[in-house]
Image (tube, grey):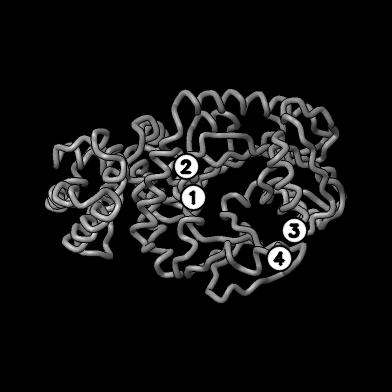
Amino acid sequence: MNARRVAYEVVRRTFEEGAYADRAFPSVARRLDARDRRQAMRLTFGAVQRVRTVDHAMETLAGRSPGKLQPQLRSALRVSGYEVLFSDGVPARAAVSEGVELARAVAGERTSGLANAVLRRIAEAGGDWVAGLPPALRHSYPDWVMDEWTAMLGQGAAGELAEAQNEPPELCVRVNTLKAEEVDLGVPVRLDPDVPEARVLEAQVDVGASRELSEGLIWPQSRASMLPARLLAPEPGMRVLDLCAAPGGKSGQLAALMENRGELVCVERHPGRAKALRATLELFGASCVRVEVADALEFADGGFDRILLDPPCSGLGVLAGRPDARWRRSLEGAEEVAALQRRMLDHARGLLAPGGRLVYSVCTVRRDECEGAVAGGRQTLPHVDGTDGFYIADATGV
């Protein structure tokens, strides 16, 4: 497969079979070299993220309702329509030609004329047409998400946030100081004084295939997601609780900050995820950890010096790395998790020892789940801070 065919296959699986794009991509793209893999990932993630804009272009510019097209042709046009409108690396004429060939290959010779007509009309409209669309259509988000961000940040900043999450997220790893003080991945790195264990990679590296990852020396983790453990500030010898622990990146960071001295209890309710969590923490060399399979709201052990609560959330701060997540979220679902977060906060406070500290963290940008849950925290923003959108707050006495 070439890069466009890989993108087509992942887009097809995402929208026709309900697959998660970021999970499907590695297996589909496994035979590509590094350069083609990068191109395929950009086409894949971009086509999934921008599908609302591209579908709108098919319908309004070319008079073709995506829902009435042959599924294979629909997926091919979504990939090629994205490339025509948003890719700077390929001239529009070439993108149209490649798109017609893709449609022919996956949907049959008879579709090539239709594909050519649709893509040419999209190319003729171009970026000026996109720029004139309403914000949710222009940036390709559900209306409710843009409404939430506009109410929280104002229209200009909401647009900047939306655009930032249509770009690739920062490539960052956490050095696991239980095993190494430093690692060399062969590319320049940028440091952050707020999270000394973070290394922002300033060139492309296949972290997933690296020896450092397989040996537990590093873990892919954004700078924003490392801030909660830093605010919690566990000390060696303390009793610490990670109440919603899987997949384990923050748990491993906590164990490292504790220098493997004391007790770190990690709670995960799903047995399969708990098993994977144990394996990850074992890979890190985190020997102070005990994994408990339990619902966070039913976990009754108490007397903890430090508690990290990173509950389920709407995930509106990590949409760059999870391209289809924006299409799986709803306002009703966001309101449900906000209510759950408040119940978890109340429960977690009852598990603290006198003088203990509780830190609340969510990977979202949404007022009701952030300052509406715990006031006075820190909100990171992708378009401002260059990292994921997280909200982190000391919730001890709130």
**Residue type highlighted by circle 2:** Ala
- Mark 4 vs mark 1: which is more N-terminal? 1
Left or right of residue 186, residue 359 in this image: right
Q: Earlier in the sequence, mark 2 or mark 1?
A: 2
Which numbered tag is attached to residue 283?
3
The secondary structure type at the circle numbered 3 is: helix
Q: Which element is circle 4 on? A: loop
* Amino acid identity at mark 3: Leu
Residue 36 location, x and y as percent? 40, 67
How packed is label 3: few (under 14 Cα within 10 Å), some, or many (20 or more)?
A: some
From the top left corner, tell me how far across and down residue 371 is, in percent: 54, 33
Q: Earlier in the sequence, mark 4 or mark 2?
A: 2
- Residue 200, above or below 265: below
Identified at 22% across, 60% down, the residue is: 95
Dot 1 amino acid type: Ala
Picture disc at residue 19 = 2
Which mark is on residue 299? none
The answer to which image quadrant residue 98 occupies is: bottom left
